[in-house]
Image: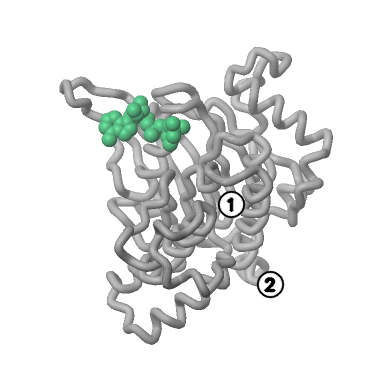
Amino acid sequence: MTVAVAQARTRALGAVRLRGLDFAFSTRSGARLPVLDGVDLEIGGGGIVALIGPNGCGKSTLLRVIAGLLAPAAGEAMLDGTPIAGPDPRIGLVFQEPRLLPWRSAADNITYPLELAGWPTARRVERLAALAGLVGLDPAVTASRPSELSGGTRQRVALARALAMEPQVLLLDEPFSALDALTRERFDLELLRLWERAATTIVMVTHSIPEAILVADRVVVLSPRPGRVVADIAVDLPRPRTIADLDQAMVSRTSREIRAHLGDPDAGGEAEPGGRVHQPIERPPAEFAS
Ligand SMILES: Nc1ncnc2c1ncn2[C@@H]1O[C@H](COP(=O)(O)OP(=O)(O)OP(=O)(O)O)[C@@H](O)[C@H]1O
Ligand SMILES: [Mg+2]
């Protein structure tokens, strides 16, 4: 067992299990477009998985299936042992383009799910302050509309909204792709600090191999459409992580392995089928809370 796996946090809630997931869209011409093909994936509660794969392979579709926004044609998606049958407050999704309501202030976007859930104003205000702190949002900007905010601040607002109902699972679809390189690294590290406090299971789609390695316990590589899992690669880096960790020899090895599974002819060598297998360890929830 590696050090990273030994230090990975696991907890009782937020376990995601995907079994034989198939999904197809019906196109305008009436044809069937297969997008996901027999996707199997298990993520223990509190785990962080990065999903990586070529454009159009079905990553966003997969997140929407896990979020209960799309129903699979076959197979099932489960959260903590029960099928995900529709949108669920235990699952938060940050879309590829932050879908904020343009006519609402940042604050009112963040508290929108609380409003829908019938929270009284005083409780919403209190929760807003906690969420702004959690995602590092400057309280001075919460009165602004989304169009008045920078891309990075909009992402923080979208993240805060996704966290509003204290989800067990956080699905992030290329959340930081529009940010400059240094800001992106900072956001990645802030996400990890947030994970240390909020303890959610995270599934993060990214096109950045270094980002996947920096953030995740495992990097799951999908094939071109219809997406299926071609590798599940453990990231053997201890936590807490820093940018300096990306300099380790192990990182270039992992990076080469991911590239090989993505079909990069310059990655050197053949991709080992299925990648290295991740072995989660079980720990009592109390240990996680400490
Ligand atoms: N609503 C839809 N109706 C029909 N086809 C769709 C729909 N949404 C997505 N598709 C198609 O399904 C396939 C998978 O799309 P998806 O957005 O899941 O890919 P992706 O892996 O997230 O790609 P990217 O890396 O570009 O974000 C693509 O071929 C896309 O054109
Ligand atoms: Mg996408």
Evaluate whether residue 169 shows in this view. no
59 in relation to 27, above or below? below
* Residue located at (76% from left, 52% from top): 242
Crowdedness of circle 2 by 10 Å Cα count: few (<14), some, many (20+)? few
Crowdedness of circle 1 by 10 Å Cα count: few (<14), some, many (20+)? many
Task: Measuring from the top left, give residue 161's x and y in whole percent.
Answer: 42, 63
Ligand 1 shown in quarter: top left
**Between disc 2 and disc 1, whose residue precedes?**
1
Residue 279 quadrant: top right
Mark 2 element type: loop
Residue, disc 2: 290
Towards the viewer: 90 or 105? 105
Mark 1 element type: loop
State which quarter of the image contains the N terminus.
top right
* Residue located at (37% from left, 50% from top): 67
Q: Is mark 2 within 8 Å of ligand 2?
A: no
Label 2 sits on what residue type? Ser
Q: In the visual, does 41 lie left or right of 38?
A: right
Residue 47 circle label: 1
113 in relation to 3, above or below? below
Task: Measuring from the top left, give residue 227's x and y in whole percent.
Answer: 43, 27
104 in relation to 42, above or below? below
State which quarter of the image contains the C terminus.
bottom right
Evaluate whether residue 129 shows in this view. yes
Q: In the visual, does 171 lie left or right of 26?
A: right
